[in-house]
Amino acid sequence: MNAAAMTRPELEQIRAWLEDVPDPEIPVLSVLDLGIVRELRWDADTLVVTVTPTYSGCPATEVIGRDIEQALAAHGIAPVRVETRLAPAWTTDWLTEAGRDKLRAYGIAPPVNPGEGMAAEVVIPLSAIGRRRALPEAGVECPHCGSRNTRQTSRFGSTPCKALWRCDDCLEPFDHFKRH
Amino acid sequence: MSDAKFEYLLRLGDSALILGQRLGEWIGHGPVLEEDIAQANVALDLIGQARMWLAYAGELEGKGRDEDKLAFLRDTGEFRNALLVEQPNGNYADTLARQFLFDAWHHALLEGLAGSNDARIAEIAAKALKEVGYHLERSSDWVIRLGDGTDESRTRMQAAIDALWTYTGELFEPDAVDAELVEQGIAVDPASLREGWLKLVGAVLAEATLTMPSPEAWMLQGSKQGRHTEHLGYILAEMQFLPRAYPGAPW
């Protein structure tokens, strides 16, 4: 396989090809936008792709592994080994800016980072548990009309990573990609 | 050498697995669509966690049992899940009371395990902790909403807490397996979680205008030795039917 080794594409090129591998549940996002591809490296003639799962039970994880292998095979990269890495645990902070824009355009409100005017969306506000906990000063920005006059209607949506929200200005319901 | 660790991993994996299976029973039967979806999502997190714990247990055991074999080919006496999680779904207050009592314990346990000397246990715990924080938020919200709700919902939530209380004691009872692993810095001493758990549960029940049963009440135990309530056998009969009737059937 010396010939193959000589024409081996750059890792940056391979990474760029992964831009075409969509998340199966939210196809506007690529696996790169999600921030789950943590490392690309060669192990002899095998390309090793290290992926971090989003949620422990997310059924998309296995599909993503297969999709990555197929996409790379189409570019002549084989064999490919997809390895799972748990630590550090995936966080929505790894979502790219481009990914956030794509989510918004798709009608899903992206996760809100700390310091963006919605301090209450912390991951585990145990101290705040209780019926009278402080409501966030501003809601998640509505992906349809941009209003922050919004509220959560359900803690879970169609996938583990989303919650259901509703805009009180344009009255449209929308998905919110939860901060995790 | 790793017998204790294998045993400990079964406890973690089985509790997540059996509660996940119980929550799955709600699918298609939730009181509203959003709650149906919520139960499914919590179940999914737990089954994902169970898979990671049991896969590790199988590797340590080294007898060729993967997470599927451990989940589908053991009988009741070999299961190590907490008695609390095998209790029936009952009405919605029963399900959410069970979830809350479990989540409050689970969250504290995972917080401790995230600092385990065993790197793999630490990373699984750190990952699961993020999900369980969200579960705890939701279940405590529900305890408060139903407790401080109508007369009917309050009566049911109080009855649910009272009925499940006897299954909470064993969560904090250490045995030789715990002692050995605590000594090695791998596990968390269950007794050390009790004070924080009582405090959190007490605060949420107070907010819910409910009465906390006595922490000194008589408690059932036995799951660490594989002694279960009669409910577990029925869960396994349903969960394991397919792989037992059609051995080796792939998805």
Image (cartoon, helix red, strand yellow):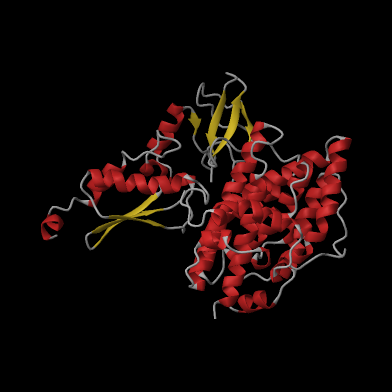
**Of the pair B214 and A143, the residue shown nearer to us:** B214
Is residue B112 among the parts visible in the rendering? no
- Which residue is found at the position 81% from the left and 45% from the top? B207
Q: In which quarter of the image is the N terminus of chain B?
A: bottom right
**Of the pair B199 and B240, the residue shown nearer to us:** B240
**x, y percentage for residue B159?**
86, 47
Outermost residue, left side: A3
Please give left or right for residue B10 compared with residue B152 in the image. Answer: left
- Against B111, residue B4 (above or below) is below
- Which residue is found at the position 60% from the left and 26% from the top? A166
**x, y percentage for residue B86?**
71, 55
**x, y percentage for residue B181?**
61, 76
Outermost residue, bottom side: B1
- Which residue is found at the position 31% from the left and 40% from the top? A19
- Against B12, residue A39 (above or below) is above
Outermost residue, front side: B245
Please give left or right for residue B37 compared with residue B69 in the image. Answer: right
Question: On the image, which quarter does residue A160 sit in?
Answer: top right
**x, y percentage for residue B162?**
85, 53
How many tags in the picture? 0
Is residue B229 among the parts visible in the rendering? yes
Question: On the image, which quarter does residue B84 sit in?
Answer: bottom right
**Of the pair B222 and A90, the residue shown nearer to us:** B222
Please give left or right for residue B207 compared with residue A170 in the image. Answer: right
